[in-house]
Image: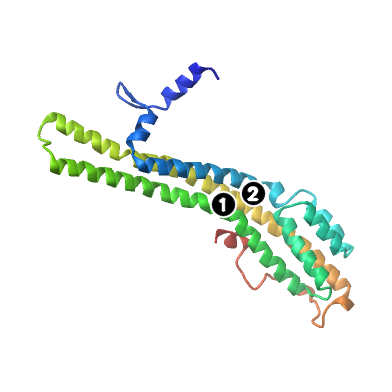
Amino acid sequence: MNPASFSILANAMDFVVGDKNYPLSDLFIKGGSIMWLLLLMSIVAVCVLILCFVSIRKSSVLPEKMVEQAENFIRKRDYSGLATLCQEVDSCYTRIMLTVANFMQQNPTANFEEVRELASAEGGRQAGFLGRPVSWLSDIAALAPMLGLLGTVVGMMKCFFEIANGDFSGGQQRIDMAGGVAEALITTAGGLLLAIPAMIAFVWFRSRVHRRVGDLEAAVTHSISVVATQLQNHPGEQSARPFRAETLPHTAEDTRSWRDLGRN
């Protein structure tokens, strides 16, 4: 992009009132110290957006063909190989299955209910990790307008103090007062300019998290079902409490979905 293009872009971003342009840099400086806080929050928001993009990728949640590979190890009852596989690929699914594999190695006589509760607890924890950065966007969207309003209130207070301490009966004084009120509103506009995109990003990423968590929940349920089948086919290796096939479709004692846990 040549310098002329930059100049055109900069002029397009100016705040125009009638035939007069107000550069954004000048408006930023007139906004006062609150604008620097809003700038810092905008930088944090960009970092959070990048973190959300990275953490909610399909490869970071549920890599392709990982469920089939894990199922092969489970059917062979090779939980050591399953643990090695999960350590090689870092994702939410592999972290859950790594926990299950380590538990089965340490407790070869464990029953299905114990494995299911363990997988459910770790799944809820992973869902919470996915939803945490997204919730930060909601926090930024809620805090930015409040900071902008604070800057406006402080600016209005200064303006009215000047009115109380000076003579604003003339025309020029009234014009100066109007300019002071306009400057006080700059921070509110800045807060809204940050809050609106942050809220839009929050809504979009929240829907993506729900979709990823749903896929993750289905994949883990399938893998745990395979574990249940292996436990049922080897009753001599189970504990005194037998496995009942009719318990397989039941949910864990905590009836909340991983989506609900991810919002906390």
Q: Is residue 94 left or right of residue 229?
A: left
Residue 226 coordinates in the image, percent (x, y): 81, 64
In front of the other: 112 or 1: 1
Please name the amino acid that badge 2 sits on: Ser
Q: Horizontal and vertical percent for residue 150?
A: 33, 48
Q: Residue at x 13, y 42 (%)?
A: 165
Residue topped by disc 2: 55
Going by the image, does 68 lie left or right of 35? right
Q: Is residue 74 above or below residue 46?
A: below
Q: In the picture, which quadrant includes the C terminus?
A: bottom right
Is residue 81 toward the left or the right of residue 155 in the image? right
Q: Which mark is residue 173?
A: none
Vertical order, 128 against 1 (above or below): below
Left or right of 224, for residue 262 = left
Assign a secondary structure to mark 1.
Answer: helix
x, y percent for residue 189: 36, 39
Seen at 41% across and 41% down, the residue is 36
**Type of residue at label 1?**
Pro
Do residues under tags 1 and 2 come within 8 Å of each other at their CB atoms? Answer: yes
- Vertical position of residue 205 compared to residue 126: above or below: above
Per the model, the C-alpha gap separating discs 1 and 2 is 9 Å
Label 1 sits on residue: 133
Label 2 Cα crowd, 10 Å radius (few <14 / some 14-19 / many 20+): some
In this view, the residue farthest toward the bottom is: 240
Q: Secondary structure at mark 2?
A: helix
